[in-house]
Amino acid sequence: MSIEECLIDLRQDADFMRHVTAWQEIPARGGMFKPFPPNLEPRLVQALQQRGVRALYSHQAEAVDAAQRGENPVIVTATASGKTLCYNLPVLDTLLRQPQARALYLFPTKALAQDQLAELDVFLAAVNETPPEPGHQAAAVGLARSPISASTYDGDTPRGQRRAIRSRARILLTNPDMLHTGILPNHPQWAAWFAQLRFIVLDELHTYRGVFGSHVANVLRRVQRICQFYGSAPQFICTSATIGNPQELAEQLIAAPVRLIARDGAPQGARHVVLYNPPVVDRALGLRRSSVLEADRVAAAFLAHRVQTIVFARSRLTTELLLTYLRRRVQRPLPTAQRQPGAAWRQVEPDAVRGYRGGYLPAERRAIEAGLRNGQVRAVVATNALELGVDIGQLGAAVLTGFPGTIASAWQQMGRAGRRQGVAASILIASSGALDQYVINHPRYFFETSPERAYINPDNLVILLNHLQCAAFELPFANDETFGQVAYTQELLAYLAQQGRLHHSGDAWHWMSQNQPSLSVSLRAAGNDTVTIVVAADDAAAEPDAAAPVIGVLDRFSAPLLLHEGAIYLHEGSSYLVTRLDWPAGKAYVQPASLEYYTEASSTTTVLVQREEQQERLPTTLRCHGDITVTTKPTTYRKVRLYTQETLGTGVIDLPEQSMDTTAYWLSLPEETIESLRSQGLWWGEPILDYGPNWQEQRDRVRARDGYRCTVCGAAEAPERQHDVHHIMPFRTFGYAPGPPPSGNQAYLEANRLENLTTLCRTCHRRVETLVHVRSGLAGLAYALVNVAPLHLMCDPRDLGVTYDIKSQHNGLPTITLYDRIPGGIGFAARLFELHTALLHAARDLVMACGCQGGCPACVGPNQETVDSTLSTRQLTLALLDAVLT
């Protein structure tokens, strides 16, 4: 059995092929080789030859040459193209020639550092066993008797071993978090080490984007500052998966020029890339068969052909669900008719199908990785934890359960199957979501568009101030010193002095506290105003134990929606019930819970423009970007049953509103555009001022009937404000016209009947009105835009927020605002401003390609309108897009 036979079976499966939107074969590619650089240390050449390496790939040789010339190379080539040698060779070449030299390897995760250490140790063993040539300077200083050693140094390193590692290791493998909190604040203990630091390696460069990348850029500023203090100036070597702007990203991170090496010289086997859209099960609602069920079926087909397979899932919950399905499937014997004739059939054991995600113990993950390499594990279901370069051997097929968010990540995941020879297959199975549907229905976009750009903003004021404090703790700032390339460093230091955190004395600024500021600065959050999540006692009435374990922190802006009382907080694959949120103290108390539901919170959001950075009036739209304040008020939450998505109940969230200053892009519709739509009957925007002569009477009767309580959350009517009364079937759909016939009618009688009215508090009414997209196509366009924007930004969809106003407080026009969900912004707003027209075209393509009738989660959001609505959200959105793109 082979992968080729499996692909033939899939091609002959008419039901499968009916839903394939693209099947592209990428032909095999031969390697491009270059001889070893003539000045490469002979022991390295011998060690490589012992491993069967007779020449280098062209990009490896180019990287070694650039590093030896003192440049900062950035290597951007495919998965499994030998990028490790691109930095190991020049680093070891220097360390062999300079007995005191040191190198720092930075990896985004501890697991990746451990994996790279295992590979490095094997190579070092061969190098260290090879004596230097007679007369070589290394022999003169006795280097042969002092082999090069490498060690990991992270949160898992036993404290008893740390001193020995500092004195012994010449290559240190760590992560940015440990460098930030454990090494830089304690740099006097590392003085000799920093003084001899010659190289800093940044592996998986593409992961350093957004908030995390902005923090890492500041950590590297601190590293370079300390190196300068000890008299060293290390070179950088960076490696990355394919992204749209690797050179720009690298130069922002290290604040120095780089040499881009992007021509891949490694051979590559043929690859089949298939885009698959599950069948529609409800055309009116735009619902498709679950991508999870489809991934289970496709992965099982590969397993039946003995093809070692990796299945990527987008969440921990989906990973465990897929693992359960796949294990149950392989326990059922394949029908005899489906077995390959003449093949020695052997049932796949359930233990040969494993999961891989956050929350697994390190030893368990290492065992799974080893099982993949030696073939004992035939399939692995993983989150993006296996997207990075952990060595898992040569797999035959990759199945992606849903689009992972960016084209770059999709190709990275697909690259985990297939190595340098042999055929590989990658199948992307779309979900019903708008982002997935755009990609799956635009194959040319997927195959021909350059990967997304990675954005960071190291000078984000919140992030920058945090790292200035960390840097001041590490070393005093001189009066004329700048932090990186920040020209206004001295002004920021003066501000920190006014806050009592620094003291200016003589020609320097000094830290004023014994507290280590880095301990309160997370590299994954923009600010340090957080809520700590504490596991409370089983007895809900008991006082929280001061020694109770802390399982995480969450930024305060996000906490109300995820840590309100009654919420289910998911952590490391486990569920916790939030029993109490102490908002003033910034602590949430949780208890382990085995429940069959999760919670989903709702909120209302308003934006206030503080400053316009740039504005442009176009013929049909007004585009702007600038600074805004986002105010969010949590309102209600619902309990959602696992798997079925059934609503089991609702609750009210009683927490204060939160405000955040950030950056945003917004588009507004001028009066001419609105008038054009209005004249065609395609604009439902103006508020209704006349609900008919009997409105007040009916309104009072409904409130009395409902006991003056909200029918959704049960809130009692307050004396100072009456509850709202809401039309279940929108009033506008009845076509009421005031006045006597023939121009007027009495449609209000049917619209205002008691059965069509319900009492709602203001909060619940706002939520309902947001869901019922009858005011205009504005809501549908907002939904489409926020779903296509991440394709252009290389960001997680959760990094962007969106809101729309029928009459903006800023300019009085109908406005859609897309904003950074990060205090201070990260740079998305300016890029969205540039992409204005391209985003509108992409949104129209998304809506046009959808086969639903009135609107669905794959295009303009769930269609909440009644069957009596004159026009659907989808129609209104398309009309609006046609108007602005005319």
Image (tube, grey):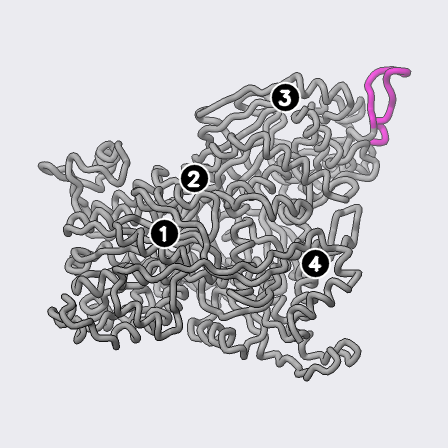
Sequence order check, earlier mark of 3 and 1 = 1
Query: Considering only vertical position in the picture, is 74 above or below 291?
Result: above
Name above or below for residue 303 compared with residue 870. Answer: below
Residue mark closest to the camera, 1 vs 4:
4
Q: Residue at x 52, y 56 (%)?
A: 412
Q: How busy is the neighbourhood of tag 1: few (under 14 within 10 Å), some, or many (20 plus)? A: many
Q: Residue 112: horizontal and vertical position, in percent?
A: 40, 64
The magenta region covers: 735-752
Q: Which residue is mark 3?
A: 620
Q: Which mark is residue 290?
A: 4
Q: CA distance from mark 3 to mark 1?
A: 43 Å
Residue ID for mark 2: 826
- The amino acid on which the numbered mark 1 sits, given as a three-letter code, is Ser
Q: Which residue is mark 1?
A: 522
What's the amino acid at mark 2?
Answer: Ile
Q: Earlier in the sequence, mark 2 or mark 3?
A: 3
Q: Amino acid at mark 4?
A: Ser
Query: Marks 1/2: CA distance?
Result: 16 Å
Label 3 and label 4: CA atoms lie apart by: 39 Å
N-terminal of the pair, mark 3 or mark 4, is 4
Q: Is residue 210 magenta?
A: no
SS label for mark 2? loop
Left or right: where 491 falls relative to 209: left
Local crowd size for mark 3, using a 10 Å CA cut-off: few (<14), some (14–19), many (≥20): some
Image quarter of the C terminus: top right
Residue displayed at 19% across by 71% down: 133
Name the spot of residue 523 as percent of width and height, x first: 37, 51
